[in-house]
Image: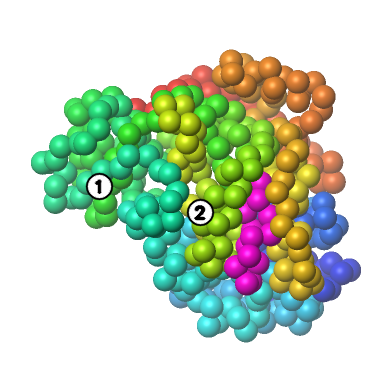
Amino acid sequence: MDILVKNTNRKFLPVILGTDANAYGIAKSFHKEYGITSLSLGKAPLLETKKSNIVKVMTFHEFDHDDNFVKYIEEVGKTYHQYYEHLLLIACGDRYTELIVNHRDVLDNYFVTNYISNEMKEKLENKEDFYQICEEYGLDYPKTFIITKANKDNFTLPFDFPVAAKASNSIEYVDLEFEGKKKGYRAENMDELRQILDAVYNAGYTGSMIIQDFIPGDDSTMYVLNSYSDRDGKVKMMCLGHCVSEDYTPHGIGNYNAIVQQANKQVYARYQKFLEDMHYTGFSNFDMKYDVRDGKFKVFEINIRQGRSSYFTTASGCNLVKYLVDDLIEHKQMETHYHDNPYLWLHIPPKLLLKYVSKDSYAQVKQLIQEKKYDTTLLYKEDRSLFRAVMIRRFYHMAYKKYKLYFNKRGI
């Protein structure tokens, strides 16, 4: 196996599982903090990490299948372990996180990681179990009703429409293909809800469907919390973001395209207690929505990794990978950092955001843009090339078309 990454600093090498925007954001964070190039591994090359100077990509056939993953990751481990003191392994997707958790017996021979146990992962990633845990630990979440394949034709909801609908088992759901598929749905009435359920279950889904009271409000009521907990289960970094524009494409619903960093002491305190009581370790990422009806932040899910838009944390001056390195490589004693530095992260052009942002967020967003207090994941002055310039320009051009086609369309 050829050595693609030959950093002068041989103390550690970031090995990133994934080739998407999340992976590029992590690589950019490492480059900004340490001036090093990362290695990205995946099953297919994606534009976000292609022909980059800060991350080199290796792809393997069906890399997300257990047998292939073990085979290839061990080859990478054996090869690069000869050149670097530590190989720091980071997942940028649910499936890669699952593979790390399931194959620690192999990975621990070559890589340094900080992820929770498989038992805790199963409980937190299954939304039914997660909401039960929220009950136990006092986290607010939307009113929820569970539908299974057995009862999908005979049920009565305990709350009114509109409702949100999503698969409880996201890993099973992601592999399904059917017309009209979305990451999440909004149903205005029972007929629409039944159409959604029929489409999902007819496609072969076997898990439960989560039906929730739809919390009123537009993008400006959505929030995302990033956190890092050290190997001892102590929270060392918390960074809250206020979503000001979501992704509206069918496969992108639930992702964010623009976030303003915004601190909240009450949120920080509540979620720190939750994570530490659980003895959670590693990155965590919570999606939540502010419910104006009762003044509570209500959580939808936890990702047991940094999220797709987590570069907003680094953009706002809190480089998330530094906490990982200080903990796992440098073994430093860290004080807990509660980030508070309003800054705008973008995954779309500024002009497009100003066209579609809600009136409640417009003034703040416009001011941050005018003051040049914003950053993007893909644009990086240290990683310029003609290819990347053309690629990003095309990516932004498509964003205009997607907003025109999908904006505020979350139904069937």
Q: Residue 150 placed where, x, y %? A: 14, 51
Q: Which is more toward the observer, 81 or 309?
A: 309
Q: Indicate left or right for 140 with 48 as reference.
A: left
In this rendering, the answer to whether 24 lies above or below 61 is above
In this rendered view, identify the residue nearer to me: 330 or 276. Answer: 276
Residue 310 seen from this side: no
- Under circle 1, the secondary element is strand
Q: At 69% across and 23% down in the image, what residue appears?
A: 365
Q: What secondary structure is the magenta-colored segment mainly? A: strand
- What's drawn in magenta, residue-wise? 226-239
> Which residue is label 1 attached to?
146
As displayed, is residue 132 above or below residue 300?
below
Looking at the rendered structure, the secondary structure element under dot 2 is: strand
Which quarter of the figure has residue 132? bottom left
The residue type indicated by label 1 comes to Ile
Task: Look at the numbered discs 1 and 2 and tell me whether their residues touch, using CB distance below 8 Å.
Answer: no
Amino acid on which the number 2 mark rests in the picture:
Asn
Report how far apart the C-alphas of labels 1 and 2 lie in the structure: 20 Å
* Residue 167 image point, x, y percent: 33, 47
Q: Which of the 4 image quarters holds residue 17?
A: bottom right
Residue displayed at 69% across by 59% down = 236
Report the quarter where the C terminus lies.
Answer: top left
Q: Look at mark 2 in the image and give the residue it sits on.
A: 303
Viewer-proximal residue among 358 and 46: 358
- The residue under the point 58% across, 15% down is 359
Q: Where is residue 350 in the image (x, y as percent from the top left)?
A: 70, 24
